[in-house]
Amino acid sequence: MKPRKIYLEEHEMPTAYYNILPDLPHPLAPPLHPGTKQPLGPQDLAAIFPMELIKQEMSPERFIEIPEEVQEAYRTFRPTPLIRALDLERKLDTPAEIYYKYEGVSPAGSHKTNTAIPQAFYNKKAGIKRLATETGAGQWGSALSLACRMFDMECKVYMVRVSYDQKPYRRSMIHTWGAEVVASPSRDTKAGRDALAANPHAPGSLGLAISEAVEDAAGREDTNYSLGSVLNHVLLHQTIIGIEAMKQMEKFDRFPDMVIGCVGGGSNFGGIAIPFVRERIKGKKVRAIAVEPASCPTLTKGEFRYDFGDTAMMTPLLPMFTLGHTFVPPSIHAGGLRYHGMSPILSRLLLSNLIEARAYMQNEVFEAAVTFARTEGIIPAPESSHAIKAAIDEALLAKEEGQRKVILFNLSGHGHFDMSAYDAYFAGKLANHKLHVEDVKKALAQIGEFPVPAV
Ligand SMILES: Cc1ncc(COP(=O)(O)O)c(C=O)c1O
């Protein structure tokens, strides 16, 4: 009998996160103050983040212990299963072995809960009563609403307008966990009102929703801001995925030839890939492949620059691949991948050739999603389906080359609230948005004056 999935026991769940900062071959350039454009100190971030998270953002420690309260909250759904995609392998008739780590078993439906829980915990411990955040696809807003419920905190979610309209049941979930949710741009902040004045029908973007949430948090003593991706501490929390996956692959008696994940701001890919990149730095052979939408191709078509994380230029300037903070990606259904920037850690790893990147069109991604649903049963989130498409392509290449590759990918979430996107795909109504090079050029020209980080 071929084992199909590996569960870890609760006591086998990792008790520390892995921090790659001390192992990077080149240190990260520091974030810069949005006003002075000088390197930031911890105090500059203290207006919107608790000190424990600020310390994690810059920590030189290789391993950071997971507090017992956070471990207990994780145990509601972790460890998550590692599954061998036997039916997908058969369908593709490939000699490759395909494994996926399934993060959709968290109550909110994705990996986002892995960082929502510690972020709520550290804020609560610092005396904060309320968190403000943005959400693209609705997955992050759901996860933070759940985490705030776990630690008895209030939560306000600025949800990108397109997703707010496309995914009404994500809003219902957020309400059910007791948080407040508004469409972004909203009338509740200056950034939102300015955007609506410029375009009353603005579809919104993650960059703008971040501006609204940061403005909300900066204006209230009892409120901090919480970000669902991009930052070092977020990727740190997500490494629990890769650490578990490595243990599970060992139980299958395998080490992957490649690890694949989709990238919006980089947290689920970073989460599964970074523990394996550590092995690669130590000399093991393993590829790490980041997959993004062709309509928002930050890693494959962006430039490595200092740029703002948001549209209204309120966040620190981060050294990252960017399409420019004013770039508004087309309204694709993988709302969580519509972000102009990228995690500085992943940006650095790409520059150091420790990871690679590729981009796919929306329709080919949905074709892969449907193939997966019809073989493995799980209906994947449109974001995660980018990783599936890459895994299928790699398995087909292995077949062509007659190689028995071991492929591991992160299935970051389920798509139960994305069924309107599947309907649009079946009706042939999904557009294959092309990137408008002129839009990116224009957006990048606006950051032409900003300092350029050393490579
Ligand atoms: C299911 C899912 N996967 C992936 C992402 C992309 O985010 P990240 O790159 O931070 O993992 C999102 C973002 O909302 C998501 O909801």
Image (tube, rainbow, N blue to C red):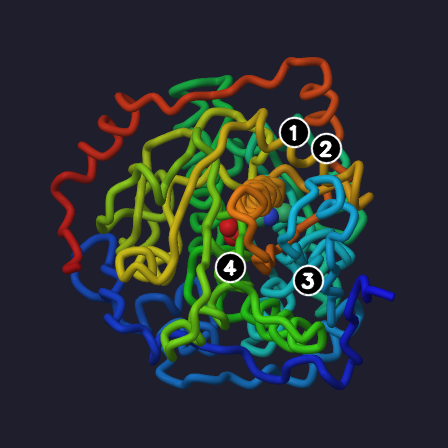
Residue tagged 3:
148
Mark 1 near mark 2, Cβ–Cβ under 8 Å? yes
Classed neighbour count for the residue bearing mark 1: other residues with Cα under 10 Å, few (<14), some (14–19), many (≥20): some
Residue at image location 32% in from the left, 33% down from the top: 326
Q: Is residue 192 above or below residue 237?
A: above
Q: Nearest the camera: 32 or 259?
A: 259
User: Left or right of 391: which side holds 351?
Assistant: left
Residue at image location 68% in from the left, 36% down from the top: 369
Q: Is residue 56 above or below residue 374?
A: below
Residue tagged 4:
258
Classed neighbour count for the residue bearing mark 3: other residues with Cα under 10 Å, few (<14), some (14–19), many (≥20): many
Residue tagged 2:
370
Q: Does any portion of residue 126 appear in the rendered image? A: yes
**How far is mark 3 from mark 2, CA to CA?**
34 Å
The amino acid marked with disc number 3 is Cys
Q: Nearest the camera: 228 or 90?
A: 90
Classed neighbour count for the residue bearing mark 4: other residues with Cα under 10 Å, few (<14), some (14–19), many (≥20): some
Mark 3 near mark 4, Cβ–Cβ under 8 Å? no
The amino acid marked with disc number 2 is Val
**How far is mark 3 from mark 1, CA to CA?**
36 Å
